[in-house]
Amino acid sequence: MINFGTWLRQKVGCRVQKLALDAGFSCPNRDGLLSTGGCTFCNNDAFNTSYCDRRKSITRQLEDGKRFFDRKKADTRYLAYFQAFSNTYAPLPDLKAMYEEALSVKDVIGIVIGTRPDCVDNEKLDYIGELSRRALVIMEYGLESCNDETLLRVNRGHDFACCRRAIEETHKRGIYTCAHVIIGLPGEDKEEMLRQADIISSLPIDILKLHQLQIVEGTTMAREYERHPFRLFTLDEYVDLLAEYLPRLRPDIVLERFVSETPPSLLVAPRWGAKPQEITRLVNMKLDAVGFTLESRRDSSVKPMPFKRNRDAIQA
């Protein structure tokens, strides 16, 4: 199983940095179309970087992002990461304007679009599919869980069948597809989580992001946890689970992450007292013990980039 950084470098031949954006989107689970409370676990402030400001233009945010990362390496290229809220939840002409503006910024070679599976349709996917033939495009869908009871419990607003349809339709158009999954949601035990690893492997995804459940200040789940605390993973339990979970995944899935970090000022629980790098080290040690490595697959499994613009950008 290859990690995301290696996969990207094999794709474009140089260092690639994601630059997060807040393009001013909302979410049907917040604006009243489906609900007004949002998903019970969600607080966008937990992952918005300091340079993201929806009052700024997309170009300005990207240029500020470049300065934020200080351009330490001259050959760095960038992916514009439409991250905050649901980044296909707008009319298609508005989406086109925003995506094209991002791709017009110097050294931006592609876009990553974070969204909900119920916020895409054929017209939008057809356009994004066309865009993916001239830039690197990754669609990120929040699956969160494969269990309909869990999705209902966290007020997700759609079922797993909706996730599967969106991923299959995206894959059919040749667009790289990423799924987000939260490990440890209320009501799911170890057996259920391992069962879901098999389901996730059956989906035509290219990339997977795993997040340990974190209780974040300002969320419905934080209020639920305060009233009726439920059990969360200890660090050792999470590491042990991943040592069983990851080897069950389809080996050609690119693993982007398996641990998340919430700002300490917003994190209610669990407080493991370990940085992501330390958790990664512990997971790798556990995986080594069972004879599994996260980078056992190399260039032979990677498709070449099908568009000319990125190759030209790399040579510039």
Image (cartoon, rainbow, N blue to C red):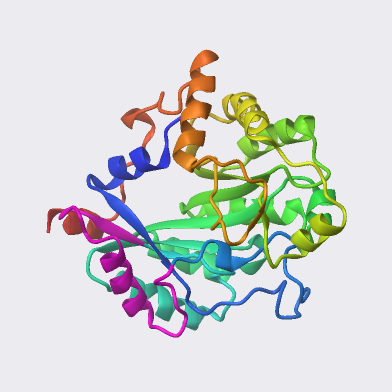
Corner quadrant of residue 45 = bottom right
Q: Is residue 255 left or right of residue 216?
A: left
Evaluate whether residue 56 shows in this view.
Answer: yes
Label total for image: 0
Q: Which residues are magenta?
A: 50-79
Corner quadrant of residue 118 = bottom right
Q: Give the farthest residue toward the bottom.
A: 55
Taking the spot 51% from the left edge, 27% from the top edge, the residue there is: 282
Q: Is residue 308 left or right of residue 164?
A: left
Taking the spot 76% from the left edge, 31% from the top edge, the residue there is: 190
The quarter of the picture where the C terminus appears is: bottom left
Corner quadrant of residue 240 = top right
Evaluate whether residue 134 shows in this view.
Answer: no
Is residue 87 shown in magenta?
no
Q: Nearer the viewer, residue 179 or 212?
A: 212
Q: Give coordinates of residue 63: x percent, y percent.
A: 28, 73
Q: Is residue 249 above or below residue 178?
A: above
Is residue 68 shown in magenta?
yes
Q: Is residue 256 above or below residue 284?
A: below
Q: Give coordinates of residue 65: x percent, y percent.
A: 33, 67
Q: Give coordinates of residue 266: x percent, y percent.
A: 61, 61
Taking the spot 51% from the left edge, 35% from the top edge, the residue there is: 279
Q: Give the farthest residue toward the left.
A: 316
Q: Is residue 265 above or below residue 239?
A: below
Q: Is residue 136 left or right of residue 85?
A: left
Q: Is residue 188 left or right of residue 239?
A: right
Q: Is residue 247 above or below residue 89?
A: above
Q: Nearer the viewer, residue 114 or 291?
A: 291
